[in-house]
Amino acid sequence: MTSTKTLKNSIISVIGQILTLLLQFVNRRIFVMFLDIEYLGYQSVFGNIFSILSVAELGIGGIISFHLYREIVTDNKQEIGKLMYLYKWVYRIIAVAVTVLGLVACVFVPYIVNDASKDVGYLYTVYFLQLAGMVAGYFLSYRRTILAADQKEYKTVQIDLITNIFIEIIKLSTLAVFKNYILYLTIQLSTSVIANIVILIVTNREYPYLKDKYKITREDIDRRNMIPDVKNFLVHKVAYAIYGGTDNIVISALCGIKDVALYGNYFVLKTGVLNVLFYRLLNPVQAAIGNIVYSDRGKDELWKQFEMFDVFSFFFASYISAGFLVFFQPAIQVWLGSTEYLLPYSFVIAYSLTIYLGAVWEIVYKYRSVFGDYRQDRNCMLLSAILNIIVSVALAKPLGVTGVQIGTFVAYLPIAYGRIRFVVGGFFGQSVKKYLLKHAGLFAVVLVEGAAVHLLTRDMPVTVGGILLRFLVWGIVPLAVNLLIYFRNPHFKDMCGYFKNLFNIVMNKITHRK
């Protein structure tokens, strides 16, 4: 693995995400000072609708990405140019398709948004503004793919960060002066458009051959097996859009738009923290994995590396799920200044367990993403979508938002199984049963850790002293249990060695600069 490139991408991504997270926290805190939090509920519900409409993308981005890894390894500019040229034109067609689908879907807006204080005309204004922002993205966002596949994701992070800071200042200033949500949203939607224009300029300079016109033949498409891949990945897209894009719709329709806005507080906190501490660290690893998989390294060596990452994923997932269990409620109370923005603690438990599943198997997803062949786990994706709708709708009325979250937790299990079967069993040729039994045992450990930190912190006050005591308990309990389990494990030792190597790279860079 190209450790220096991966480390550079990870560090810059994390720094960028920390600053972006701080901006999000300040943004939401100021927002509730000037406008009702219900407005953020509109944005979340419509965002879910558009995530479902994104199935029109057909998975082209993922398919192009895993083909790019192979061509970047060999520096085949002609094939890279063809792939990106095809990407551009397919995305333009998709933009038109999404526009049409968005116009059709708008008829459901009055039925989805429940208990709204604004009239239908206002809701449609918000809806069409968000639709316009999404469609604009399809014309420009495809250029991000070449930077990510070439392990230069740090450049997109830098561009996004600078753009976000600039737009955030304008947006919040406008909100304070005019207290107008439509104007606020319009400015917000311009962020990605501006960032994508800058990325287009940068990639034109670094990859000048992308400006050329290429002739794409049916042979080019058939040779890469793209049509079968698109058909199979379309199932993935539809299923994952239903799995990941319906929670807010179900909550809005069955529980009310206010609960959507409250759920958004937890979602922002969860997404921001995970991006800082985990996903931004691992995103650059995916490109490195793609380069390695298409190199000549042996499966035994790759499996050893995978197991090292699997140990790291457990350490992180157990820590972060316990952390959310302990800090979700007091963090939101301190952040937004009132207990009225809290959801029930039963929801926090269900959400924390769902976060654990996603984090512990994120590395499996990173490996799975570089292979293509979406036929392998499409049925698992379909099962997940069906389960999410059935369980979430069935439990929404009796359990509220907690019931919807339980549906999300249950529905993630088929997704994880399909990926594990493909990567662990299919690619590495290892025992899937053994791997799952190991993780079943680890999940039991996480339940014990969660119960312990909850019992030790539940009566602590929401004060500076109480927060510090929570940190102390959270810092000691999972670490002590995890070390007791893993301190003799060779993959744990490999993980320590890997991070020691990364630390040495950082120190050498610092010393060299001095």
Image (tube, grey):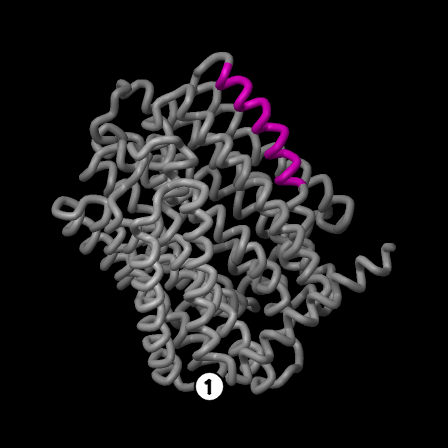
- Quadrant of the frame with the N terminus: bottom right
- Which secondary structure dominates the residues rendered in magenta? helix
Q: Label 1 is placed on what type of residue?
A: Gly
Vertical relation: 87 (above or below) 284: above
Which residue, as the protein is rendered here, is positioned at the far top?
Answer: 178
Residue 244: image location, x then y, percent: 35, 51
Give 382 or 12, whichever is nearer the viewer: 12
Q: Secondary structure at mark 1?
A: loop
The residue drawn where x is 12% and y is 47% is 398
Q: Which residues are magenta?
A: 159-176
Residue 172 in magenta stretch: yes
Vertical relation: 298 (above or below) 39: below
The residue drawn where x is 21% and y is 27% is 115
What residue would you read off at disc 1?
429
Disc 1: CA contacts within 10 A as few (<14), some (14-19) or many (>=20): some
Residue 397 in the figure: left or right of residue 342: left
Residue 227: image location, x then y, percent: 47, 62
Q: In the figure, residue 322 lies in which quadrant?
A: bottom left
How many labels, in total? Answer: 1
Residue 276 in the figure: left or right of residue 119: right
Residue 366 in magenta stretch: no
Residue 203: image location, x then y, percent: 71, 46
Q: Is residue 228 visible?
A: no
Residue 67 in the figure: left or right of residue 80: left
The residue drawn where x is 34% and y is 48% is 460
